[in-house]
Amino acid sequence: MEASERPHRRSWSITVRRARADDKEAVLSFATRTWDGSDYIPDVWERWLAATDGVLLVATAGGAASTAVGGRRPVDADGAPLEAARAVAVARLTMLSRDEAWLEGIRVDPRVRGMGVATDFQVAELRWAAAHGVRVVRYATGPDNEGSHRLGARHGFALLGEWRWYGVDDEDEETPPPDAAPSTGGVTIVREVDGDRWWERVTADPTLRRGHDLYERRAWALQELTEERFRGHVARGQVTALEYRADGADRWALAIARDEGWGDEDPALPASPALLVGDGRAALALLQALSGGQPGVPRVLLPDVEPPILDGGTVSAWAAAGWRPRDRTLHILTRPLDAAHPLPEPEDAALLEMEEDPRAVARHWSAPS
Ligand SMILES: CC(C)(COP(=O)(O)OP(=O)(O)OC[C@H]1O[C@@H](n2cnc3c(N)ncnc32)[C@H](O)[C@@H]1OP(=O)(O)O)[C@@H](O)C(=O)NCCC(=O)NCCS
């Protein structure tokens, strides 16, 4: 959208509140066909509504300021009246840990896009995040989603980096049939790793560092890998590693399994790891062992479009084995919430109403004991 085409900022307020079951029809009316006629919101609506590890928010058109004497009735970008109190935007805030929040699923009704709805809604999301005491909020978006990038920039989100997938692209490819028996070239997979020894390696790993220590413990959401979390994964048997000596060098690789998938994974296929680090050739051997012989499965998300793990020409060995770099990448944006980065204020305070004061209602995910 060119700046000159952008409609004027609206004169009516949005009211932000937690979503209710009876918002479903309104929300799905604008969050079902977002990209090329499809969207995942209908698939996650019930789950997100019921989830206790986050807050599902909606913004409705109009509020006290809109309907008060002299206030403006809500209208869309073409000036057509909007039904008051009907949801025109949805977004979810997930508590990944005690101090890290993740934003996902923001959708604004196309009738009111470009009117500053998301800009004000984002202030409300950050208020809810702050009420949970988080120190950092992150989200992911496509590199080409200019609206999402500009929206984040309005309230202090900065681009942290670009991540790229390797292997089969689940959006446009059939999963290839197994063409080989799993092979690690005679190297033994370690399934009971020694937490002390391996944490030392993992924490110093250049690929983890390049990715700002983030990993995908929960599908589609990145958070920091701390020693405590690493030890939790070890205790839960989610860490797989291998090590060997070749060409006079010690080579190793380590993968951590995710705690949570997205919910639509094919249980017959090996799941993508939350983290893959180490030496590129060893990592490929580990991937092949995890793959059950299917080239390119599971696909892997690596930080920085040229991650250290693929230095030294390893990328061609990966590609030949089925894990070729994908064109599609992901941008991760981040915003601290601390004394130096306080909560933003809406441009016009009267146009953002909060139906309830944000408070810590969500419990962050914790490992099963
Ligand atoms: C992205 C989206 C949430 C923005 O909602 P919105 O209410 O229209 O946004 P706002 O009017 O508050 O504008 C926010 C900023 O984004 C810019 N923007 C909004 N839509 C844009 C577009 N299509 N192209 C370029 N910039 C856009 C605005 O100009 C504004 O930036 P500025 O203040 O620097 O001018 C909305 O377009 C949408 O629902 N898109 C589909 C879903 C989506 O992409 N979600 C984000 C996935 S991470």
Image (spheres, rainbow, N blue to C red):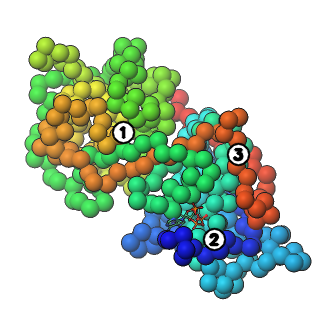
Which disc, if any, is residue 176?
A: none
Seen in the image, is 88 located left or right of residue 200? right
- Residue denoted by label 3: 343
Q: Secondary structure at mark 3?
A: loop
- The amino acid sitting under disc 3 is Leu
Label 2 environment density (alpha carbons within 10 Å; few <14, some 14–19, many ≥20): some
- Which badge, 2 or 3, comes first in the chain's sequence? 2
Of the pair 263 and 19, the residue shown nearer to us: 19
- Residue denoted by label 1: 303
Outermost residue toward the right in this view: 69
Determine whether 240 is above or below 294 in the image.
above
Residue at the image point whose x is 63% and y is 36% from the top: 135
- The amino acid sitting under disc 2 is Met
Picture quadrant where residue 82 is located: bottom right
Q: Does any portion of residue 255 appear in the rendered image?
A: no
How many numbered marks, from 0 up? Answer: 3
Counting from the top left corner in percent of width and height, residue 348 is at 76, 62
Determine whether 29 is above or below 290 in the image.
below
Label 3 environment density (alpha carbons within 10 Å; few <14, some 14–19, many ≥20): some
Residue at the image point whose x is 79% and y is 56% from the top: 356
- Residue denoted by label 2: 115
- The amino acid sitting under disc 1 is Pro
Counting from the top left corner in percent of width and height, residue 195 is at 40, 17
Of the pair 1 and 355, the residue shown nearer to us: 1
Outermost residue toward the front in this view: 4
Q: Secondary structure at mark 2?
A: loop
Per the model, the C-alpha gap separating discs 2 and 3 is 21 Å
Q: Does any portion of residue 195 appear in the rendered image?
A: yes
Q: Secondary structure at mark 1?
A: strand
